[in-house]
Amino acid sequence: MRDLEQLYATYYSKVYAYVLAMSQDEHMAEEVTQQAFFQAMKNLKKFRGDSTLLTWVCSIARNCYYDEKRKSQKLTGIEEITDLQDDFDFENYMKNQSALLKIHNALHEMKE
């Protein structure tokens, strides 16, 4: 149980930022992030270690996001989803998102 709490505490903000960047919707990002961690915790024993835990959880989050988009019928079909994934450089994306999150947090903590 402690490992699950640590997984959540360690990666929540990064996964949330990743989903928020895709969705541009705070409510959806929160919902999808929760779903992703639920799925990750449920399937943690299946994690093979082919990638980092962060990459694995983000791929789960991405799939959860696409599922939500399909449910809301905002994506027209699988071709559009495939196009989104083809040229995506996840490692650079996460580095940029991490830097943006730090900047956002620093600006948020500043006085008017």
Image (cartoon, rainbow, N blue to C red):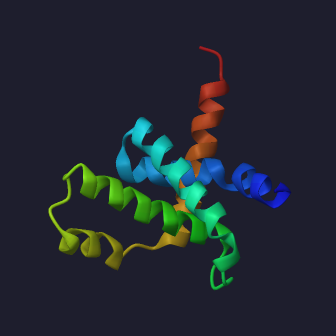
Which residue is at a point 67% across and 25% down the rendered structure image?
A: 109
Q: Is residue 56 above or below residue 64?
A: below
Q: Is residue 53 above or below residue 20?
A: below
Q: Quadrant of the C terminus?
A: top right
Apparent side of residue 83 relative to residue 60 in the rendered image (left or right): left
Which residue is at a point 42% across and 50% down the rendered structure image?
A: 21
Apparent side of residue 23 relative to residue 3 in the rendered image (left or right): left
Residue 20 or 71: which is nearer the viewer? 71
Q: Position of residue 30 (x, y in %)?
A: 50, 41
Residue 78 or 105: which is nearer the viewer? 78
Residue 58 or 94: which is nearer the viewer? 58
Q: Quadrant of the N terminus?
A: bottom right
Which residue is at a point 58% across and 70% down the rendered structure image?
A: 55
Q: Position of residue 64 (x, y in %)?
A: 42, 59
Q: Position of residue 6 (x, y in %)?
A: 79, 55
Q: Quadrant of residue 62?
A: bottom left
Q: Position of residue 61 (x, y in %)?
A: 49, 60
Which residue is at a point 73% across and 54% down the rendered structure image?
A: 10
